[in-house]
Amino acid sequence: MGRLSEILQLAQQRGKHLGLPYQGALTPAEAWFLWQNAPGAKLIDVRTHAELEWVGRIPGAIEIEWQDYPDRQLNPHFLSELKHAVSSESLLLFICRSGIRSGDAARLASEAGFIDCYNVLEGFEGNKDAHGHRNTLGGWRVAGLPWIQG
C-alpha cells in the first residue's frame, strides 16, 4: 500500500497547491497505477462519444459524456449516470482530452457527495505543442498507457 498512499498524498498536495475543489490531481501514469492497484478505483472518461470513436478509448473506463458533440451542451444526466455507475465511496479518476472538462466533472461530483475525486492532468491527448498539435506534450497516449482506436 506504500506506493498507493504516496501517489494519493502527492496528488492531494498538487490539488492544494492548485486550489482545486476536489481531492487532487494525477499524472496519467499515476492514474493508471491507482486504477490498476487501488481497490474500487474507477476511471471515468468524460469525453464525447465522437472523441471516443474518432480519437480512441481507454479499455475498461466508464464512459459518461460531460457534454455532447457538436453542440457542446452539458449532459444534464451526468450526475445520475455517475451515481448509477459507481459508489459514492469509490476512488474516482476523471479524464478528458486535456484535463479541463474532467476537472469540472471532478468538481461537480465532489459537490454532489462523491468523496474521493481526482482529475487526470494532461488528459488523453495532452496539451497543444508549438504547432498546435496534441499527442506530443503529455497525456495518456504519450505516456504509452493502454488505449484502442475507436
Image (cartoon, helix red, strand yellow):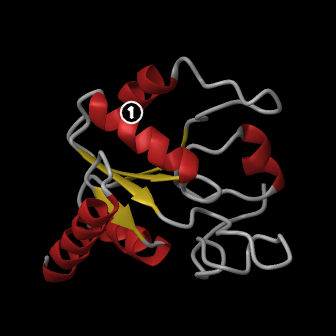
Front-most of 146 and 109?
109
Label 1 element class: helix
Specify whether residue 45 is in view: no
Task: Identify the residue at image location x=73%, y=39%.
Answer: 49
- Callout 1, which amino acid? Leu
Which residue is pictured at 73% across the width and 80% down the height? Answer: 136
Position of 74 with respect to 132 (left or right) is left
Q: Position of residue 128 (x, y in %)?
A: 73, 70
Residue 35 occupies quadrant: bottom left
Quarter of the N terminus within the rendering: bottom left
Decide which of 18, 49 is in the foreground and name it. Answer: 18
Q: Nearer the viewer, residue 34 or 71?
A: 71
The location of residue 61, given as percent across then percent down, is 52, 52
Q: Position of residue 21 (x, y in %)?
A: 30, 45
Q: Nearer the viewer, residue 118 or 37?
A: 118
Up the image or down, 121 lies above or below 57; here it is below
Q: As displayed, is residue 50 above or below residue 140?
A: above
> What residue is disc 1 on?
108
Can residue 17 be seen here?
A: yes
At x 55%, y 51%, the residue is: 100
Question: Which residue is depicted at the point 70% across and 40% down?
Answer: 48
How crowded pointer 1 is (Cα within 10 Å; few <14, some 14-19, many 20+) is rated as some
Q: Is residue 43 left or right of residue 60?
A: left
Q: Which part of the image, by quadrant, shows the C terminus?
A: bottom right
